[in-house]
Image: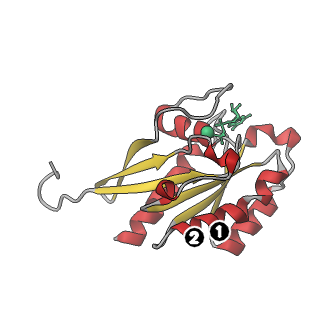
Amino acid sequence: DDGGEGGEEYLFKVVIIGDSAVGKSNLLSRYARNEFNPHSKATIGVEFQTQSMEIDGKEVKAQIWDTAGQERFRAVTSAYYRGAVGALVVYDITRRTTFDSVSRWLQELDMHSDTTVARILVGNKYDLENIREVPVEEGKALAEEQGLFFMETSALDSTNVKTAFEIVIKEIYCNVS
Ligand code: GDP
Ligand code: MG
């Protein structure tokens, strides 16, 4: 059912990328189910979660994909990226190496996408401020340079998680409508 007059349906594929253990799976479980797992292992089973939001009175669904831990082997497949119109590129503010990987992830995303992809750079684990290695200014500067939105989040205490996903979903909606 399309909701009748003027009813349009939107379904957008969004991918989450970034180094291993930056918190990708927990960002998704926090957003989609309001759950956090302190001992999460590599994702098993579920490939994506679907989450709805309303924009301009329309129901917009995002099908958000999580890696099954393949990023450890630098072998995220092209099927993972296929059809994606949005991406969260995640690093861990307490590990600089994960920030250094961001440009490689952006390149991979570019290589696999043939449309405009709404992208946000996400510095996760904001709750671990005391052991931060990447200053917020550096995250902001990289995002600006690469033309990405930017947000620091905590999947642990929920800070900015919903906002980060919704920024991407709204931007996709703007890109297509
Ligand atoms: P992924 O490999 O990128 O999917 O990362 P996971 O979601 O599996 O998280 C890796 C580890 O970091 C797990 O032990 C999580 O509990 C932890 N973690 C994830 N997000 C946060 C966060 O925002 N804050 C803190 N303190 N730990 C987090
Ligand atoms: Mg994971």
As drawn, the label of residue 111 is 2
In the image, what residue occupies the spot 18% across and 58% down? 7
> Residue 57's x, y, as percent?
29, 56
Q: Of residues 15 and 3, which is closer to you in this image?
A: 15
Categorize mark 1 by other alpha carbons within 10 Å: few (<14), some (14-19), many (20+): few
> Residue 81's x, y, as percent?
50, 58
Q: Secondary structure at mark 1?
A: helix
Side (left or right) of 1 relative to 25:
left
Q: Which residue is mark 1?
A: 107
In the image, what residue occupies the spot 40% across and 51% down? 62
In the image, what residue occupies the spot 53% across and 32% down? 44
- Callout 1: CB less than 8 Å from ligand 1: no
Side (left or right) of 52 relative to 103:
left
Q: Identify whether 56 is placed above or below 159.
A: below
Rendered-image quarter of ligand 2 = top right
In the rendered image, is residue 123 in sight? no
Asked if marks 2 and 1 touch (Cβ < 8 Å), the reply is yes
Work out which quarter of the rendered image holds the C terminus and state it: bottom left
In the image, what residue occupies the spot 59% across and 39% down? 25
Q: How many marks can you see?
A: 2
> Residue 111's x, y, as percent?
57, 70
State how far apart marks 2 and 1 are (Cα): 6 Å
Q: Secondary structure at mark 2?
A: helix
As drawn, the label of residue 87 is none
> Residue 2's x, y, as percent?
17, 52
What amino acid does circle 1 point to? Gln
Categorize mark 2 by other alpha carbons within 10 Å: few (<14), some (14-19), many (20+): few
Q: Of residues 79 and 51, which is closer to you in this image?
A: 79
In the rendered image, is residue 94 in sight? yes
What amino acid does circle 2 point to? Met
